[in-house]
Image (spheres, coloured by chain):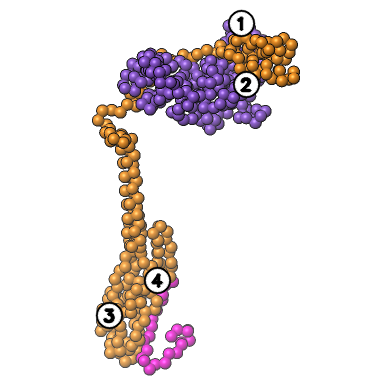
Amino acid sequence: MDTLSTIDNLTFSAGLRHEVIADPTSDHALLEATRIGDEDAFAQLVNRYRNQITSYIYRMTSDYDGAVDLAQETFVRVYRAADRYQTSYAFSTYIYRIATNLAISELRKRKRRKLVSLTGFFQSKDGAEPQEFNPADSKPLQDCEMVDTERRQAMQRAISTLPEKYRAPLILRDVEGRSYEEISRILKTSEGTVKSRISRARGFLREKMRAYL
Amino acid sequence: MRRMNCQIARREIEEAPAGEVVGGVVFDHLQSCASCATFSNEQAKLREIIGSLGTIEAPGDFDFKLRARLAGERPRAGSSFHLPAFAFGPRSAAFATLLLVFGAGLLFVSMRSSRDAGQLATVRAPAPAVEKTVEPVARPDTIKNTSEAATTNDRRNAPAATVSNGPKSHPVYTSTIASNRNSNRPKSRDLSTSGAPVLKSSDLNARASDFQIRASRQPLKVSLENVQGGSRTISLPAVSFGSQRVLPQNASLMASARGSW
C-alpha cells in the first residue's frame, strides 16, 4: 500500500479546508505545527492516537510488545513524512493505513518464518489461506467474570486465526467502529469488497465461537 | 422469493451498525423466519463479544521511547550539509566510501592479474639432444668453453645449464632448473646458460679417446603453473650418457654386441 497516495473522494472544499486547519486542535493543525518544528503538537497527536493504534495493531498481530514497537514505528513514519502530508484526506485514515501496512508486513514475516502451531493447520473450504486449527470450546461455563474474560481471550485467539485480508476490515468495523467508507479508504479497496470480507470473517468466527453464542 | 428475502435480510443484518435493531421489512421477515432469527441473534452476540475486546492501552513509557527513537532520526548539527536538490548524510558518505573501497579493490585485482600474466613462467621443454658437431676428440685439458651459443632453438629449449670444470680431465655439465615461489604465485626464472662447448677437430687427438659426460641420474622434473595456480609436473627420464667414444670422421659406425654405438 502507498501510504501517501491521495484519495479523490476525500477532497475538502476550500472553505472547509480552511476551517479544518484553523482549528488548532484538529489533527491537521497539529500535523501542520509538527511540520514547522512544534514538538508539543506532535506529542498531542501521539497522545490522541497511541492507544488506538497500539490496540489495533495488537488485535491484528496478537503480540503486545510487537504491537507497541509497530505503533511507535507508525508514529516515526508519520513524523518523517510530516512535510509531505497532504490535508486532502483525514489524518486517521492516513495513520491507520500506515499501521495496517506495518501489521500486515509483520504477519507476512511470521508466515515466512513458518512458525508452526502445535495444533496444526487445516485448509479452509474455499481454498483461502491456511488457518490454525482451533476447535470450539465446549467446556461448561463457570463464574461470569471468568466467563467474560475467557470469552474475550477465545475471541482474540479466533481473530488471530483469520487470514490477514479478513482480519483488518473486521477489526476496523467491529472493534474500532469505523464506517465502511473509511475502512475502504484505509484498505484502498471498494466498499463492496470490505462488506464481503467482513461477512466472511464473521462467518469464520461464528463457527469457532459456537459455544459462546 | 423466500430465499431472496432471507438473503436481503441477512445482508441488512450484517451491514447494520453494532447494537442497532433492524426494523421495517427485515424485522417482519425475522418474525416469520426462524433461521434468519437465529442468524440475527448469533450475529448480535458475536458482535457484542468482538466489541467487548475494547482498546488496549499503550505502555506508560511509550512517549519516552518514541522521543528517543525520534531523536535518533533527527540529523545532528554539522553532520550533514544540504544541496538544493538533496542532502548528504552519514549514510550517503558511508555508501560512497564503500563504493570507493570496492572500486579500488577491483582495480587492484585487475592490475595484479595483468602483471602476473606477463610474468607467467614460460614452459621450457626438456633439452633435446644437443646438436653438436662431432669432431675429433680434443685433449681434455685443452677443451675450451666458448661463449658461442648453440642454435637459438637449443637455447630456448635447453634447461638452464651451467658448466663447471670438474676434474681437469673432464668437463662436467650440470643442469638446473630454478623456480621461485612467492606467497601468491609460483614464478620461474629463465636462467641464462652458456653455450654448449664445441669440440673442434683441431682440439681432438687423432685417435679416438673417451670422455665422460656426467649427468644426474634423477629424472628431470619440469613444473608448469598457470595463472590460476594450478600446476602440472612433467617428469623426464634421466639421460644416461655413460661413456661415449668419439670416432673420427671416416670411421664407420657399427653397433657393438651390446647394441651400443
Q: CA distance from mark 2 to mark 1?
A: 31 Å
Q: Position of residue B35 (x, y in %)?
A: 72, 15
Q: CA distance from mark 4 to mark 2?
A: 87 Å
Query: Do tags 4 and 3 sit on the same chain?
Result: yes
- Chain for mark 1? A
Q: Position of residue B75 (x, y in %)?
A: 30, 28
> Which element carries disc 2, helix, strand or loop?
helix
| Residue A199 numbered tag | 2
Q: CA distance from mark 1 to mark 4?
A: 100 Å
Q: Is residue B57 above or below residue A61?
A: above
Is B215 situated left or right of B194 in this image? right
Query: Do tags 2 and 1 sit on the same chain?
Result: yes
Chain in purple, by letter, is A
Q: What secondary structure is the stretch in magenta mostly built from?
A: loop
> Which element carries disc 4, helix, strand or loop?
loop
- Chain for mark 3? B
Instruction: List the residue tagged with mark 4.
Output: B125
User: For the N terminus of chain B, which image quadrant?
Assistant: top right
Identify the residue shown where x is 29% and y is 71%.
B192
Q: In terms of sequence position, does the residue under pointer 2 or pointer 1 come before the other? A: 1
Q: Which residues are magenta?
A: B237-261
Q: CA distance from mark 2 to mark 3?
A: 105 Å
